[in-house]
């Protein structure tokens, strides 16, 4: 099998490259390194079944030879990134998805879209099921990411219906683990980095908003099972164990042994979801998948990565 992973130098993308190689695939990683990190894939450069191509997927994608699977993960994925790169985020979700789908059609390859729980917006349904259409502000600051992913889903289904292309849509919920950037801007990197530096942990609002965190190994396993499945409907990939942001910050303090204080600030942007928890009934029934790594063990594994990253930063 030969697979193309766009955004393959990113957090989830790089773990996906590892997983596919371990399954015996040849992997072509395509990334323009806007938010991806070559250090995430440096250990793969000596592998004869791994090829890295630095390329912006909003431009025509040329991959010589046969391709069996295309996994489209190219996109800024944290609020800090897509607020800094709003136009690039919209372009990669639209033009990039179009180019990746065109490659899949030309190669007669299975296409998997990395969508997101953010397509549900600030939800009125809890937990979120795949048949919920969401509540998104298209002109809000977060809309550049939310609407890019929603358009990507529509385009993916259009290619499936029009060209009978074998497509999959993964709605990925909050995922964490090694290789997250320490300046990522999402809750876990912000909390863990602050705790390890002995700086205050900042919580926006009163901390009652909830999230559900899935360890990256579980997420990647779910993505692979979806990739080789027969379904074309969107599938939620995430952990159902919900926790408030305030309690999550306290967990990080406990696991790091930090004495950092918790401080509260107003939300910097509107539209931050108040709740986030996937209904994974479809993933259980169709993929036979559910998360295995509990948050305590996942945080311990992630802590080692952040300790090394902070140490490198302070040299």
Image: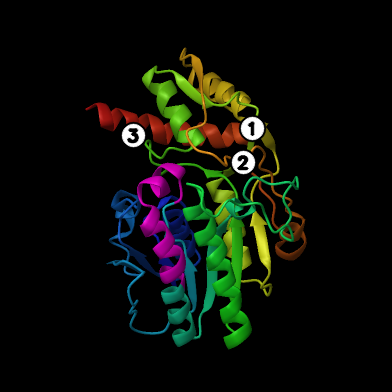
Tag shown at residue 273: 2
Q: Which residues are magenta?
A: 77-97
Where residue 109 appears, x then y in whole percent? 51, 81
Where residue 122 appears, x then y in whole percent? 64, 45
- N-terminal of the pair, mark 1 or mark 3, is 1
Within 10 Å of disc 2 (Cα), the crowding (few <14, some 14-19, many 20+) is some
- Marks counted in the figure total 3
Where residue 267 appears, x then y in whole percent? 52, 31
Q: Check residue 217 for magenta coloring.
A: no
Tag shown at residue 209: 1
- N-terminal of the pair, mark 2 or mark 3, is 2
Marks 1,2: beta carbons within 8 A: yes
Label 1 to label 2, Cα distance in Å? 7 Å
- N-terminal of the pair, mark 1 or mark 2, is 1
User: Which secondary structure lies at badge 3?
Assistant: helix
Image quadrant containing the C terminus: top left
Tag shown at residue 309: 3
Q: Viewer-proximal residue, 310 or 114?
A: 114
In the image, residue 223 sits, relative to residue 199, either above or below, namely below
Residue 76 seen by the camera: yes
Question: Which residue occupies the extreme front position in the image?
Answer: 139
Label 2 to label 3, Cα distance in Å? 29 Å
User: Which secondary structure lies at badge 2?
Assistant: loop
């Amino acid at each position: 099998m030969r697979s193309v992973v766009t955004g393959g130098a990113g957090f989830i993308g790089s773990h996906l490259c590892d997983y596919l190689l371990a399954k015996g695939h040849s992997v072509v990683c395509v990334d323009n390194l806007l938010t991806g990190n070559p250090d995430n894939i440096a250990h793969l450069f000596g592998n004869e079944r791994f090829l890295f191509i630095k390329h912006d997927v909003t431009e025509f994608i040329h991959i010589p030879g046969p391709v069996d699977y295309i996994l489209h993960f190219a996109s800024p994925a944290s609020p800090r990134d897509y607020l800094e790169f709003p136009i690039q985020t919209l372009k990669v979700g639209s033009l990039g998805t179009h180019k990746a789908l065109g490659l899949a059609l030309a190669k007669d390859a299975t296409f998997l879209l990395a969508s997101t729980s953010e397509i549900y917006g600030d939800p009125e349904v809890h937990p979120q099921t795949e048949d919920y259409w969401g509540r998104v502000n298209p002109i809000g600051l977060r809309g550049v990411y939310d609407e890019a992913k929603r358009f990507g889903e529509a385009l993916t289904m259009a290619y499936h219906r029009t060209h009978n292309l074998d497509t999959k849509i993964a709605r990925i919920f909050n995922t964490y683990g090694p290789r997250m950037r320490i300046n990522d801007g999402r809750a876990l990197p912000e909390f863990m980095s602050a705790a390890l530096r002995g700086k205050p942990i900042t919580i926006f609002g009163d901390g009652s908003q909830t999230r559900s965190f899935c360890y990256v190994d579980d997420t990647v396993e779910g993505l692979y099972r979806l990739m080789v499945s027969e379904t074309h409907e969107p599938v939620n990939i995430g952990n159902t164990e919900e926790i408030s942001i305030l309690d999550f910050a306290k967990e990080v303090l406990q696991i790091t042994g930090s004495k950092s204080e918790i401080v509260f600030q107003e939300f910097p942007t509107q539209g931050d979801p108040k709740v986030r928890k996937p209904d994974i009934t479809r993933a259980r029934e169709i993929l036979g998948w559910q998360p295995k790594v509990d948050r305590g063990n996942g945080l311990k594994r992630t802590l080692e990565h952040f300790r090394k990253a902070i140490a490198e930063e302070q040299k």
